[in-house]
Amino acid sequence: MTGLRFDGQVVIVTGAGAGLGRAYAHLFASRGAKVVVNDLGGSRHGDGSSSKAADTVVEEIKRNGGNAVPDYNSVVEGEKIVKTALDNFGRIDILINNAGILRDKSFARISDQDWDLIQNVHLKGSFKTSQAAFPIMKKQKFGRIVMTSSNSGLYGNFGQANYSAAKMALVGLAKTIAIEGASSNVYCNVIVPTAASRLTQDILPPEIYDELKPELIAPVVGYLSHESCSENGSIIEAAAGWAGKCSIVRSNGSVLRSNIKDNVTLENVKENWGKIVDMSDAKTFQSIQDVTGALVGSLEGQAGTTGDSGVDSGSENEDIFNFSDRDTILYALGVGASLKNPKELKFLYENHEDFQTLPTFYILPSLQANFNSDFTAAVPGKDVNLSQVLHGEQYLEVFGDLQSEGQLISKVTIAEVLDKGSGAVVVTNVDSLNQKGDLVARNQIVIFAVGAGNFGGPRTGTKTIPCQNKPDRSPDASVVQKTSIDQAALYRLSGDRNPLHIDPGMAAVSGFDRPILHGLCSLGFSVRAVLETFADYDASLFKACKVRFTKPVIPGQSLRVDMWKVNNRIHFETIVVETNTAVITGAYVDLKSVKLSQVPPNMSDSNLKSDAIFEFIIEQVNADPSKAKSIGGVFLYNITKDGKQVKQWTMDLKNAKVFQGTPEGKPSTTLTISDEDFLLLAEGKLQPQQAFMKGKLKITGNLMLAQKLAPLLKTNAKL
């Protein structure tokens, strides 16, 4: 059968003896999965047990040509259910926590037993089974977990206080698992089904009961479990052939005091109650960090707010920034947009039918406003030398449509000033508004002033938007772009005319051999790569980005942007190819949605022949680490296909490790070869010297060291 499949994957469905669970089990089995059909066989109240329910579903699946085994354990002993999967099929890829019972009583009449039984089956059962499967999924870098909640959990229901509490608790559990599993490609979502089942068969009217077919919900759960689905931490409601996403929203609320030193009174709350409960402009938040950031933003608006540094963080400076399409085009050229790529014409030609402004252009008004505000005066008792000021971090969030011309009024607020001893960190927030007063862009700039420390201020702060670590896996995609030797000279025309970026004398004074590229120019290159790969160059999909600048770039060097997709957040790291040095770290771009023009090579099942060879090499190295260490050296392989780099492998033979991706430090030797030629090389059909002389094998670094690899690469026709 064509379409979405689960061939080779193992699925556990709890409570699969009837209703929804049975429908799930049949769907997965029909699409090639091996299914563990778990069911204790009790009544909807949790009484009794029987093997008949699970056995019947297993027999049905086998009769239809599928592969399934029964499991009769209680979900409270989830590790036993997972053991059934491992004993029979050797792995676990997908877990559907579906088992449930009812003990409906009005709130005042719920006994301890009624409460505990519901919590055990719904909440603890899902917790125990997920906890047993989670480390296995993380190790194999894939897993999908689906929790089952209920409208009773989301909205409450008379007579179901115990059930409602457990079902809402599962939402919190799922969201936390989603966060902790995301970096390992382990996703967890919540299904809120309304379906005919043992739990509802004598509760719902017959005509409605007949329309709530579990088979209409099963495909939604199936897709949430498929490897192609990137949804994570979401609540999906489904019933009768309809599905929709649920979300927890919050009003804009109201600050209850005019000064942070004031107390809040009952009268303050009453006076502002209308704003507190006004949901007309409610917002959805994706994380605790987003909620905290919004709260901080609200409190920063209080008059007279003073940070720990003694700096008046409520004081604002305004700056006017006028721009036209000429400015946005010049900026696009400055960050590498080129007619070599036809899709970038939209950033370079004002009469293009889809003329767009690169979103990172909206950093420029904040930068101008920041320097015009004399932010250096925020460091108490210090004269800050601008030649010793470094741009440490940058955050940008855009709101509404990106305009190509107009006027922006930017308001600069000192968020906090930190004393790092060797220097001072000045954190400024800049809100840029259009002439109507609408917020267009919000920037946060983190500046490090060398030598301006030891003024007695706090060392750590609370108002800096944090960077995020990249996922612990190989990049999903990489894009390499070469900067021009004139890149800094071109970019400085967009406003940053610091002579450090063009004057050799000033560069020497600042400790550099030659002028360096603007960090924000490298950021522009990087975000363009993200838009190319995950937004099909649609700038309107950009929401926000955050970066940390770690090392300088020399104009003319090549930048490789490694990217990891986690839902709509694209983590990235930017590396100078010539030195293998990371220059932007802890970085991410948040997109409103992902739009792929084509699947990046490392995100697809590329079926590269070289993959099998490297798997063979891994086996050899693991079998005899000492042999690998005797060769020594760190080798980076760039594998190409149709003239384009599609994958990178590292052979760190100093430490007997072989893995996909790039090494942490500089490799001893870098080898570039096509996928086809690498296979011929491993099979002995192509000699290394012959490949090198014909240009099929390119080697940089220690050429002599590469000659020691021949015995390790030889496959002896075992592939």
Image: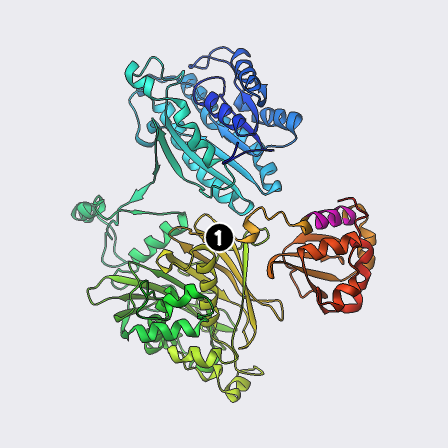
Rendered-image quadrant of the C terminus: top right
Q: Residue at x 41, y 51 (%)?
A: 289
**Which secondary structure dominates the residues rendered in magenta?**
helix
**Residue 220 x, y percent position in the rendering:** 42, 32
Q: Position of residue 441 (x, y in %)?
A: 32, 63
Q: Is residue 477 above or below residue 273?
A: below
- Seen as rendered, the residue at the extreme bottom is 505
Q: Is 668 inside the magenta-drawn segment?
A: no
- Disc 1 crowd, CA 10 A, few/some/many (<14, 14-19, 20+): few
Q: Which quadrant holds residue 642?
A: bottom right
Residue toward you, 257 or 579: 579
Residue 364, picture quadrant? bottom left
**Which amino acid lies under the numbered mark 1 shown in the image of this protein?**
Gln
Q: How many marks?
A: 1
- Residue at (46% x, 35% y) in the render: 223
Image color mode: rainbow
**Residue 422 appears in the figure:** yes
- Residue range highlighted in magenta: 612-621
- Residue 293 image point, x, y percent: 36, 54
Residue 531 in the image: state x and y as whole percent: 43, 59
Compared to 636, does 249 lie above or below? above
Q: Is residue 617 magenta?
A: yes
Horizontally, residue 407 falls left or right of residue 81, namely left
Q: Is residue 348 above or below residue 144?
A: below
**Residue corresponding to mark 1:** 598
Q: Secondary structure at mark 1?
A: loop
Kindly tell me whether residue 378 is visible in this rendering: no
